[in-house]
Image: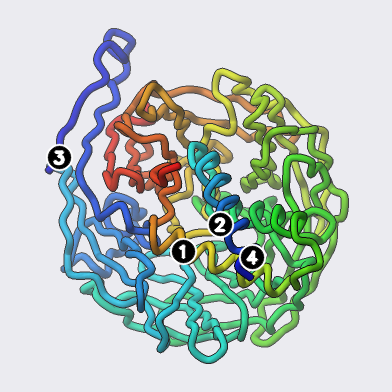
Amino acid sequence: MAEPYDFMLAKYIEIGKAGEIYPNHNPYDSSNLAMQAAMENFGNAHTQEEYDNTRQECERYVLATYHNRFTRISE
Amino acid sequence: MSFGYQILGFGAGVGKPAAVAHVSDMGTTSDQGIWMVGGDWVYDDDETNSQASTANNWLLMTEPYNTAYYSNTPISYNTTDFTNSDIASAWQTYNLGANVHSGFGGQLALDYGCYGMMSQANSFNVKYYFNDLAANLESFEHNINVTDKVQRYGSGRRMSDTQAFWQAQSNESIIIALGTYSGGSSTTISANGSEGDNYYSLGFGVPGGTGSTYANYGYANQIFFMNDNNTRTFDASTTNIDLNHVSWNGSAGASLTDTANNGAITLPTHTGSTLKPQILTTTWGNIIIHQDSANPGNSVVFPVTWSGGSATVGSSVSWAGGTTIPSNECYWTELSGVGQFRDHHKYTCGQDRNGVADLYRTVRIYASGSDMLVDTITVDFSNSNGTHTVETKQTAATTFSSSSSSAVWPIFMKNNTDLGLWHKDTAKFHYIENAYY
């Protein structure tokens, strides 16, 4: 799952950084969009459960490492 | 420490007081948000602060995910000198026996709440709770595990003063259950709902059309949620919105009834914007706000009325704020007091406290140089055809300095004029006097 994780995490941070300027932004929306992007990119190479679990790993990483402060994550 | 400042030049000579922002450090930037608020600053006159011996005004701040626990710090706030202080050290919300926890909760009313918490232990078992707080705000007085679900993330969400629902959307989605609670050890819980991707939600609402009590508009035992063709998808090309209605008869163990309103709404094209619609409750039904960050002038609202589980959607109406007050810069997320996707409390509800039905208080947050500015606004959604008015009450009522984040937890005060805003990125609490004059 290394490839989907790296891809999804990069998307998650990119989308989260763009979204946090809006007051209705929620990290969950960004991780959903990141998962959609990963599913389009990797297709049936992974199961839905694998994508779900990868999404949760990405959420946990950004929460634990950056406390969901997307705009403070360096480029 | 707190400091206050007036917005000079505004309000002078026009017969209304200027906004005064008192800014203090509160919590840390790693805190996740506020999920309980109580005391004189928010309670109705006939409500009793069971924590009065601890603090006249208080809140619970959720502290971060870490290697083991979520926790809460109880914080008091003094509305005389505009300072806050920690009442006690952080206490564990839940410790379910592993190093990975996830979830959030919401306040129903007073010191009653709902929560969902996943633990890595026992195959990622999620436990769902109703609870009420001890008088010292350092533990739960009651904490009732109402149901469980394995291999799902999940969280508790407020519906009203006495009702909540639990939902999870990982590894297929599910409306776990609806429940009723008024403190103590007794709860009433529905049967668990069905699951599948068709229960994936873009946002939740309570069907409006009855009642006008603050933070309690809408029908009991009912929720609805949005998705697109029963999928997880919402992106810049999504225009179809289904309104999926879920009802319960209120009896313990009774099944949930689903009513699909497929294709209820067709959004305008929103190329370049992935902002999903937002739901508000009114005394006559619901408003669904379509935002567009790429073309804010294309924002519209849809009026929705209900007959049981069947929704009728009226013609869209252009967002009255236009590009001057873009809807995508306004806070809507929990503005009806219905839980969405994070910690939330009752007083995120911006409904008027002086009996003006369907008048909402909220804020506009927007970038200005390296700062974010906050305007206070009201929106009148009293017309069931969706026509509405937007009014700026105070311009630049406060500033989030050296930040580009709009992540806030508002507290709309009982006096109907003041506003609290906790800004996560700077970990500062802004108490704004006269915000809604």
Classed neighbour count for the residue bearing mark 4: other residues with Cα under 10 Å, few (<14), some (14–19), many (≥20): many
Asked if residue A12 lies left or right of residue B46, the reply is right
Q: Position of residue B168 (x, y in %)?
A: 62, 71
Q: Mark 1 near mark 2, Cβ–Cβ under 8 Å? A: yes
Q: Mark 4 near mark 1, Cβ–Cβ under 8 Å? A: no
Classed neighbour count for the residue bearing mark 3: other residues with Cα under 10 Å, few (<14), some (14–19), many (≥20): some
Asked if residue B18 lies left or right of residue B191, the reply is left
> Does mark 1 fall on the same chain as mark 3?
no
Q: Find the residue positioned furthest to the top.
A: B13
Q: Which residue is mark 3?
A: B2
Q: Provide the chain ID for the residue under circle 3.
A: B
Classed neighbour count for the residue bearing mark 1: other residues with Cα under 10 Å, few (<14), some (14–19), many (≥20): some
Q: Which residue is mark 2?
A: A9
Q: Amino acid at mark 4?
A: Ala
Q: Provide the chain ID for the residue under circle 1.
A: A
Q: Which of label 3 and label 1 is nearer to you?
A: 1
